[in-house]
Image: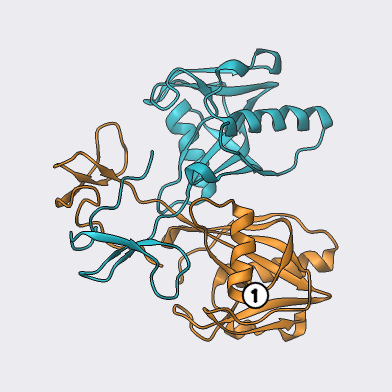
Chain colours: A cyan, B orange
Amino acid sequence: MSQPPTNFCSNCGAKVTLRVPPGDSFPRHVCDSCGTVHYRNPLMVIGTVPVWEDRLLLCKRAIEPRYGLWTLPAGFMELGETTAQAALRETMEEAKARVELGELFSLLSVPHVGQVHLFYRAWLLYRNFSAGEETLEVALFDESQIPWDAIAFRTTATTLRHYFADRKAGVFRLHAGEILPPK
Amino acid sequence: MSQPPTNFCSNCGAKVTLRVPPGDSFPRHVCDSCGTVHYRNPLMVIGTVPVWEDRLLLCKRAIEPRYGLWTLPAGFMELGETTAQAALRETMEEAKARVELGELFSLLSVPHVGQVHLFYRAWLLYRNFSAGEETLEVALFDESQIPWDAIAFRTTATTLRHYFADRKAGVFRLHAGEILPPK
């Protein structure tokens, strides 16, 4: 989901201009007709690392971007929910899976696309899952089976690498970091 | 910062209608003229708990909402930055203070206003701070001096309470939670 351009004021429909409002330090789309300042801010993508025994659940994407590649269940946080509720909802929508949430596991800023990705540890309550509308296929993978060459997003790959490293070390902690633009 | 109403399409200027797009589960503002779907998503407010010796830095707000009340330095994350960069920038803008960041300390969802507040532990590099444009006054407080009756936001008060409890316990950890609507 890229954010649509701000050519017109969403409040009154007049054309907007891009300039730094008084007292601000960033250029904003400003409506000179009704005075509305249109801010654009980063979006949160929230998901889970769902575990069943020693395996992790991944979803094969049925939508662009990255159609046909594998990812952890995740999606854009909606108004009116908490980060934890977003994680549970996305896991249900994409993998039809009920999970119990653990701690926040990764917090990855992706500044070149204006996003922050958060993943929670999670445990499948039942060995019961299936593809949601945006998913082609859902499957469990042990570490040796992870399709590293077909992972949809770098935040997913980073989270998976941290997960397996922490599992080997026997201690799970929050991994905060930044994903740099592709070279 | 409340988000302005979506009456018109920001892309083409036509009137929008509120309905659930095909394949979606939430009502969105949709433009029937150019097809743009206008999503609205939660915003991140990011700040720090700046420490100097045994005291914490607070800012007295020079802007609405909560003019004249005290808060930790924090503000809306901007496009193109990481969560850590947002924390450093807001601390500089509001308190003219340079800090060294520690771990993420609180992650508080405020679903009734569509926000998520994140606070990092932080240490002042110098005993050097002053009021930024949106601040009336900056001061250091030890635990007994915190103006509990004049704290601007519940996310600030919650973060401060967790901070002093963890300091007493001798162990700091991430506090994730939800702020419920006022009764």
Residue A30 lies, in percent from the top left, at 31, 64
Residue A121 lies, in percent from the top left, at 64, 37
Judge whether B55 appears above or below A107 on screen: below
Going by the numbered disc 1, the residue's amino acid type is Lys
Judge whether A171 appears above or below A94 on screen: below
Judge whether A162 appears above or below B89 on screen: above
- The quadrant holding residue B56 is bottom right
Q: Which of the pair A36/B29 is nearer the observer?
A: A36
Q: Which of the pair A92/A13 is nearer the observer?
A: A13
Q: From the viewer's perspective, is B5 left or right of B81?
A: left
Q: Tell me the residue at 47%/36% (across/down).
A: A90
Q: From the viewer's perspective, is B86 left or right of B56?
A: left
Residue A12 lies, in percent from the top left, at 18, 63
Counting other residues with Cα less than 10 Å from the Cα at mark 1, is it few (<14), some (14-19), or many (20 or more)?
A: some
Q: Which residue is mark 1?
A: B96
Quarter of the image containing the N terminus of chain B? bottom left
What is the secondary structure assignment of the residue under circle 1? loop
Q: Tell me the residue at 62%/61% (across/down).
A: B87
Residue B177 lies, in percent from the top left, at 59, 56
Whether residue B183 is visible to the viewer of this picture, yes or no, is no
